Amino acid sequence: MSASRLAVIVFSALVHLGFGSPSASGQDPCLTWTVNTNIPPTASDCNCTNELSSGTWPLAYDDSRGVTVMYGWAIHPGDAWVSRTWLFGGRRWAQCVTADTPSLIGGASIAYDPTNRSVIFFGGMPGLGGPPPTATWLWDGSDWSQIASTGPPGRQNFAMASDEAHSTVVLFGGLGPSWPLLDDTWVWDGSSWTQMQPANSPPARCCHAMSYDSARQVIVLFGGGASTNLNDTWEWDGTNWNERTPNVSPPPSSGVTMAYDAGRNLTVLVRGDNDNQPGEVWDYDGANWMRPAVGGPVPGPHGTMTYDRRRGKLVLYRTNYTGPQLWEYPASVRPFVVNAPVCKSICLGDDAAFSVSASGDAPLSYQWRRNGVDLNLPGANTPTLTIPVADFGSAGNYTVVVSNPCGSVESVSATLTVCAGASGCPSPVDVNGDGVVNAADIQRIVEILLGF
């Protein structure tokens, strides 16, 4: 045993046995929407411009591959109908030429399937006529394949959302083939659809929005259209719908889009009354809706939105008569913890190390803390904190605050336990394990050092 470790053991024991004692209002410049000019290019085989300016283009984030998937159809000059699959990783779009594709349909939806770890496609109305499809398609990263031929009755303008807590995809409402409004709830388990029979359910509607709140593990539903536009808020808990009654709600809206911002733990909704006017942005924290102090312009209504978990940004794609638009939010990403430090148990006098993995816009700064107090140690301002020759005073709860110009986040705590002896001890100071802290513990330490 080294002399340094021996000194630590004796000194720490004496100390703990009582023989001694050591002496924002206003706009947030980071919360802005920005236009990403890197929209999908016009396909060369179309000989037309603004391919993506007329049509429907639902998108979803493929969590297992770290890309946004967009699939839809467009009408070309001369009434030529085409379908396209595009992938977006944050810098550029890539068109995928596939052997198989879902039908040329509008009003469909896609969502991430947590069981198959891929994006699924369902629904819509055929652009070239015929009955509405009931097939479910799966994207495997390079091609589409039909994995179910039956499911919910055909529909359009419905909503789907991934339910990560229950490893399912949830579908609600929409318009049937003869234009009836629907109020049914269906759940996809990775291989088949099941119609649910919840005790409570939102009224029938179409053109509503749904997204999954990962912090509270519920699906949030808002708005839509029926005989009039709606502004009610509902949550799906895996078996039942529960209506919420926030003090303030967005105005009645249909054609809204919504996604969960995991970086801020807020559901974000974009709505508007006119394609040619800026939209409104609303945040929902699980209790109330609020208008954030968003800096700069915001996208208009009638788009589709998803959350890019890898980059920590919302991605919104919308089309109107002036052409396609791609928006991202926020312009600068606040820090968020990807991998938090984990608890450790070490022997007295050993080294201890904690590490954190964080993301967000650079530059990122770090401050490690013990029991809520900032540490002034070598490495305390880096992603990895090393505590050399730990003593009993090193034990405690460790966190790290990660900051950048847009804000900061503190990790969950990781507990460091320091024990004497190779196999540990019941408590940091009860070395001999007799339930009493006294001079006998000093004697036991000496015995340990002498090899008894």
Image (spheres, grey):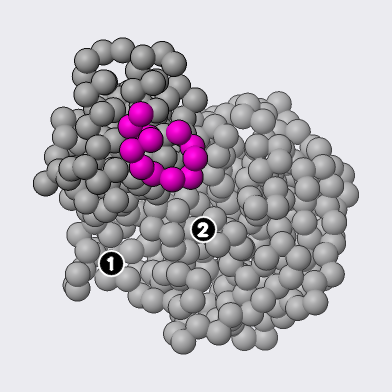
Regarding residue 382, the answer to whether it shows in the image is: no
Say what secondary structure mark 1 lies in. Answer: strand
- Name the kind of residue labelled 1 in the image: Val
In this picture, residue 26 sits left or right of residue 212: left
Q: Which residue is mark 1?
A: 294
**Quarter holding residue 106:** bottom right
What number is the disc on residue 349? Answer: none
The earlier-in-sequence mark between 2 and 1 is: 2
Residues 224 and 410: in front is: 410
Residue 430 in the image, given as x and y percentages of width and height: 42, 40
Q: Residue at x 80, y 77 (%)?
A: 199
- Name the kind of residue labelled 2 in the image: Ala
Above or below, 76 against 278 in this view is above
Q: Quadrant of the C terminus?
A: top left
Q: Quadrant of the N terminus?
A: top left
Q: Residue at x 22, y 63 (%)?
A: 28
Residues 28 and 326: in front is: 28
Residue 219 in the image, given as x and y percentages of width and height: 61, 63
User: Magenta segment range?
Assistant: 432-443
Q: Which residue is mark 2?
A: 215
- Is residue 162 highlighted in magenta? no
Regarding residue 444, the answer to whether it shows in the image is: yes
Residue 412 in the image, given as x and y percentages of width and height: 40, 49
